[in-house]
Image (tube, rainbow, N blue to C red):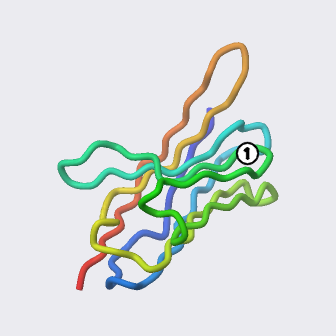
Amino acid sequence: QMQLVESGGGLVQPGGSLRLSCAASGSISRLAVMDWYRQGPGKERELVAKITSGDSTNYADAVKGRYTISRDITKNTVYLQMNSLKPEDTAVYYCHALRLGSSLYHYWGQGTQVTVSS
């Protein structure tokens, strides 16, 4: 069973940067989509960035131009580079993956806390 483990979260001041990592226990080359979600206090879970097996990317409007998602299949890891962070970026960030087959398989990480505060 695929496991996803996030790391890299922490406390950062507004305008700062963080790089999140999502390490998979198996090959990510067969995953159709890997993406990052976030959920802030009292908010719904929100898709922030996604990357496909063909390395196409999409971003939520709120993070476009500030976040970059990337994938390293040799390390079975997906990254989320977050720049120019704002207090409203504060959330638990979750890594998610979708595997296509005869059934659809979803995998979720445990999440990593990102806090943007002065």
Question: Dividing the picture into quarters, in which one does residue 84 lie?
Answer: bottom left
Q: Quadrant of residue 10?
A: bottom left
Q: Residue at x 41, y 56 (%)?
A: 93
Few, some or many C-alpha atoms within 10 Å of disc 1 (few <14, some 14-19, many ≥20)?
A: many
Q: Which residue is mark 1?
A: 28
Q: Position of residue 101 (x, y in %)?
A: 73, 20
Residue 13 location (% of width, % of height):
32, 85
Which quarter of the figure is the C terminus placed in? bottom left
The spot of residue 9 in percent (x, y) is 42, 69
Q: Is residue 11 above or below residue 97?
A: below
Q: Quadrant of the N terminus?
A: top right
Describe residue 48's horizontal placement relative to residue 55 as left or right: left
The amino acid pointed to by label 1 is: Ile
User: What element does badge 1 sit on?
Assistant: loop
Task: Tell me the residue at 66%/53% (across/down).
Answer: 57
Front residue of 34/60: it is 60
The percent coordinates of residue 30 (x first, y second) are 78, 37
The answer, for residue 27, to whether it is visible in the render is no
Left/right placement of residue 84 relative to residue 32 reads left
Frontmost residue, 90 versus 66: 66
Q: In the figure, 35 relative to 64: above or below? A: above
